[in-house]
Image (cartoon, rainbow, N blue to C red):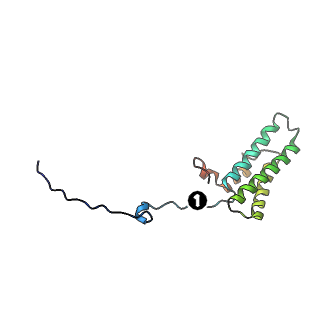
């Protein structure tokens, strides 16, 4: 075994904010969607619950359940959208659209409307990730 001479290596200090410290390029933040993902969950969840409540009663209380679903959804979406940057009128408009979708007296989950809500809220992108 031949003894090799090893030379000391000076360490390189990289400041935390430099581009080399970040390594690979960071992914751009996800694009903002029409509905916040939580709003999409509220619309589809309230719709699903309202339809589920009506099954045992054989749709006897449909008008009452539809109005309750509309009111709950409108309030929740309005709060969610405002807390995530929408102004009052914009949040109210989005809440109105979502409340109409949840308040109709039939399930929308498996329909074109349900698919549109999924797409407009970005839910397929956030499944498996923490909601912002």
The reply to whether residue 56 is in sight is yes
| Other-residue count near label 1 (Cα within 10 Å), few / some / many at <14 / 14–19 / ≥20 | few
Label 1: which residue?
A: 30
The quadrant of the rendering that contains the C terminus is bottom right
Q: Residue at x 82, y 38 (%)?
A: 54
Q: Residue at x 88, y 40 (%)?
A: 61
The reply to whether residue 111 is in sight is no
| Residue nearer the viewer, 65 or 10 | 10
**Residue farthest bottom in this picture:** 18
Q: Quadrant of residue 84?
A: bottom right
Numbered circles on residues, count = 1
Q: Residue at x 79, y 41 (%)?
A: 51
Q: Quadrant of residue 47?
A: top right
Q: Position of residue 87 (x, y in %)?
A: 73, 64
| Residue nearer the viewer, 21 or 49 | 21
Q: Residue at x 75, y 43 (%)?
A: 48
| Residue nearer the viewer, 69 or 15 | 15
Q: Secondary structure at mark 1?
A: loop
In this picture, residue 127 sits left or right of residue 117: left
In this picture, residue 113 sits left or right of residue 3: right
**Residue farthest top in this picture:** 56
Image height of 116 relative to 15, above or below: above
Q: Position of residue 109 (x, y in %)?
A: 72, 46
Q: Position of residue 31 (x, y in %)?
A: 60, 61
């Amino acid at each position: 075994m031949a003894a090799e001479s090893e030379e000391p290596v000076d360490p390189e200090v990289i400041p935390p904010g430099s581009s080399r410290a970040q390594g690979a390029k960071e992914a751009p933040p996800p694009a903002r969607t029409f509905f916040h993902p939580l709003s999409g969950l509220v619309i589809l969840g309230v719709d699903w619950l309202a339809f589920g409540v009506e099954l045992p009663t054989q749709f006897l209380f449909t008008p009452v359940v539809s109005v309750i679903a509309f009111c709950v959804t409108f309030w929740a979406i309005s709060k969610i959208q405002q807390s995530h940057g929408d102004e009052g009128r914009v949040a109210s408009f989005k809440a109105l659209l979502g409340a109409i979708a949840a308040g109709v007296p039939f399930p929308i989950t498996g329909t074109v409307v349900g698919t549109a809500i999924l797409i407009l809220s970005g839910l397929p992108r956030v499944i498996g990730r923490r909601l912002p």
